[in-house]
Image (tube, rainbow, N blue to C red):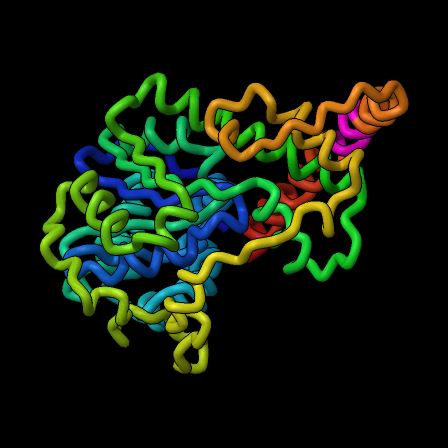
Amino acid sequence: MGRLTPLKKGIVERKGIFVVGAARSGTTLLRLLINNHPDIACIGETQFFHHNYLQLSNNQAYNLQLLDHIFKTESEVPDLLNDLQLEKDLSNIKTVAGYFDFLLSTYSNKLGKKYWAEKSPSHVIRLNAISKMFPDIKVVNIIRNPYFSAISRFKKLKNSQISNFSLITYIKYIKRVEDELVSFQSMNNNSLFTLRYEDLSSVPLGVITKVFKFLEVDSSVVNSEFLKISKKNIPVSSDGEEQEHHSRVREKLTESIYDIDEYFSAFQLYLFSTELSNSIIFKDYIENHKESNFIFFLRKALLDCLYTFIGIPKYRLRRLVNQIKSSLQRILS
């Protein structure tokens, strides 16, 4: 076995469209609409810069194994990597940025489109790292009522009841998302476009027109037929079948309205208002539930301690274990 050499990060200029947002904020809907533009191929959920890019090396077989499932489940070209010439070309690329760009450029070319874009909610907390590799990055960020995104997330996880610890963990994640966005915008003021899920649901054509103008592509393609997602722009599964949920755009454009009092206790509403009361991005959504309740104050202080001394270490340990497992797989493959 030859020496294992990680790829350097590198830089690719004049490239990079990234669709981001906190989990359950409408990124899938946004990805479908952007992908429906005749010049943009937007692939979904590569999670590439969340953890995968750290595993790229001169071990080409492992690199392809790492990425193969993405194209089989999140793209319109599930057999993209079954190409000997592409494999040969990728083996000659020595940087992470170059590798990602070449891969997605090949993907967009296969679909007859000029530009590539990528959608991963997790990339919202990696924007500063991504922008160092793609200095001309354009980021489209979507936000949603945090009460509703929390409910949607826990419903997806099939949690019938939302625990206080799970909720404080989610709210602190929302705060981290905001911190990352504010930090990124301070250094890349003209590179970020933020839209609201509620606006996209109510006036989709108007909002997506603004998105395309920000991306500097032809916005005249947005017409009364635009919401009928073209078949070629619907991802297919590994067995070649269309992923049906991607074609139900009209359903996704129907905003779910929840009664927050039905899902959250008075204390949990207090957590939202105390944690997000000073938010720049989410402040318009937050209702005032700052009850003068000493018991609430003590309960929140306990939750903060649990999050700091259990939640954060647990997350870091899990991430470290996953990195070690990935490294071992790369070495042994």
- The image position of residue 36, as x and y in percent, is 24, 62
User: Magenta stretch mostly in which secondary structure?
Assistant: helix
- The image position of residue 194, as x and y in percent, is 35, 36
Residue found 77% across the figure and 24% down from its top: 291
Residue found 39% across the figure and 78% down from its top: 242
- Residue 55 seen anywhere in this rendered image of the structure: no
Check if residue 308 falls in the magenta segment.
yes
Please, is residue 155 above or below residue 305 in the view?
A: below
Which one is nearer the viewer's eye here, 217 or 259? Answer: 259
Residue found 69% across the figure and 33% down from its top: 316
Q: Is residue 326 left or right of residue 111?
A: right
- Residue 20 seen anywhere in this rendered image of the structure: yes
| Picture quadrant where residue 83 is located | bottom left
| Picture quadrant where residue 37 is located | bottom left
Which one is nearer the viewer's eye here, 213 or 61? Answer: 213
- The image position of residue 230, as x and y in percent, is 25, 72
Please, is residue 129 above or below residue 105 in the view?
A: above
Q: Please report the bounds of the magenta region as a residue range.
A: 304-313
Which one is nearer the viewer's eye here, 56 or 236? Answer: 236
Q: Is residue 171 left or right of residue 48?
A: right
Which one is nearer the viewer's eye here, 7 or 247? Answer: 247
Check if residue 215 falls in the magenta segment.
no
**What count of labels does the image hold?**
0
Residue found 46% across the figure and 28% down from its top: 281
Q: Is residue 59 left or right of residue 174?
A: left
- The image position of residue 333, as x and y in percent, is 54, 57
